[in-house]
Amino acid sequence: MQPSRDSSRDPGGPKSDVVATAERSKSDVIATVETPKFVPVPGVPPRCGHLFVLGAGVVGAEVLAQATSLPPIERGPALDLKVVGVARRRGGAYDVRGFDRAAVAHIVSERRATAGSDEVAPSTNAIDFPARSTQLEALARLSDPVLVDCTAADGMEAVYEEALLRGIHVVTANKKALVARRDLTDRIFAAAAKTGRSFRYEATVGAGLPVIGTLQGLVRTGDRVKSIECALSGTLGYIANELSKGVPLSVAVATAKSLGYTEPDPREDLAGTDVARKAVILARELGIPLELEHVTLTPFVPQEALDAPDLEAALVGYDATFAARMAELRTRGERLVYLARISVEGTRAAYRCEVKVGPVAVPQDHPAATLDGPTALVAFTTERYGSSPLVVRGAGAGGAVTASAVLSDVFLTLSGAPVSSRGARGVAASS
Ligand SMILES: NC(=O)C1=CN([C@@H]2O[C@H](COP(=O)(O)OP(=O)(O)OC[C@H]3O[C@@H](n4cnc5c(N)ncnc54)[C@H](O)[C@@H]3O)[C@@H](O)[C@H]2O)C=CC1
Ligand SMILES: N[C@@H](CC=O)C(=O)O
């Protein structure tokens, strides 16, 4: 029998919920549950997480803005956030007292005023964090320190490992360390396990959508994932939709960038690399030792355009080709979507995993054909979700949604929620 909520004692509006069974007398009341509510105790400040944010671009700027304008705490646990550090490609700032909204707004406006000027070869640059050890050491001395990576920098595995070993939690929106060579990525998880610190990365797949947490829940509870089908590029979803409305390719790409959907280097979206990274992250959650080069990848635009020194000019050269392709799809009643499919067959001891990423023409009644704007969709087919897959759907790119996933990870970290031991049971829970 379900517990029933007995509010009969206080018809004017209960301050507490009484959990009881209908058959029992009042003396059998089994528990009194206070509505969880944070009541500030005078003189006792809430627990405070100290954030060091790397990157103040589309995502980082939103993280900074959201973290410094949090709504008042009405429900527990009482957690406050303080931004004590911001590092960007061209320097940064650190103040143990924390930056307020005005200081953060200044950092963000500085970014906007100089937009583009510090984005030289953003996808190939290792992070310039010169006083890294000193900064991390200072951060580690604060209570509940969290390093938040909102860059697209390479080589962050070493930074995360060092931070975790120093006792600093790590939250990242940057996919790159998660798809580095497996032995390097494993070192991050090993460092987290060794120090009991948390490493979270929900924003790396599906931006603000609960994709990683959902998959970890399936794996942790012993379900067996058979396939994951997904439209995981907000950028390519948006571009394909614009193309279907008759917008030229070059214009659609430029607009996607201006809306904050693309990677710092849009080539990574157009090449399919960004989606391939997300697929590798998901496959690794299943315990599959996949590397990026194992993904069968077809780019969204021809390789020649991606190789051109001036991408924008090269894309203009393909406007007519894409317009013709879209016209042809329209006459066939089909839509262009960019999909990833991860399929797993066999048992834990002997399995076969295939990962394919590329453009597909789908009929109008295909679930991905109904996606609009930068909407993403992930469908998990598992032993338990056999005939009706578990579907996660919603905006799959953009600063605001991504930042909220980053901050949710920060709050989960500070609330002490356990982190899944990655891929512990993954490949085939039942053999
Ligand atoms: N924009 C989106 O919708 C989403 C983005 N992400 C990820 O979030 C990260 C940031 O993306 P955006 O904010 O869109 O990019 P962005 O280009 O707007 O911002 C990147 C920021 O990181 C800084 N940065 C880059 N490389 C650096 C380096 N080597 N050293 C120091 N600072 C460096 C830049 O100065 C800039 O402030 C990327 O890894 C991206 O894949 C994840 C989910 C969604
Ligand atoms: N460029 C990415 C952003 C999120 O990861 C996308 O378009 O999906």
Image: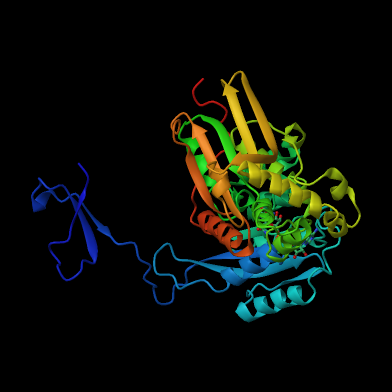
| Residue displayed at 48% across by 72% down | 71
Tell me the quarter of the image containing the N terminus.
top left
Is residue 248 in sight in this rendering?
yes
Horizontal side of residue 184 vs 372, given as left or right: right
**What colouring style does the render use?**
rainbow
Would you place residue 10 above or below residue 6 in this image? below
x 75%, y 38%: residue:
298
With 287 as the anchor, is 44 left or right in this view? left
Q: Is residue 337 visible?
A: no
Residue sitting at the far bottom: 102
Residue 295 location, x and y as percent? 72, 34
- Image-quadrant location for residue 404: bottom right
- Point out residue 288 in the picture as x, y percentages from the top left corner: 64, 30
- State the residue lying farthest toward the left: 25
Q: Residue 127 at what x, y percent from top left?
A: 80, 57
Q: Position of residue 168 (x, y in %)?
A: 64, 55
Taking the image as shown, residue 44 lies to the left or right of residue 177, namely: left
| Residue at image location 65% in from the left, 40% down from the top | 361
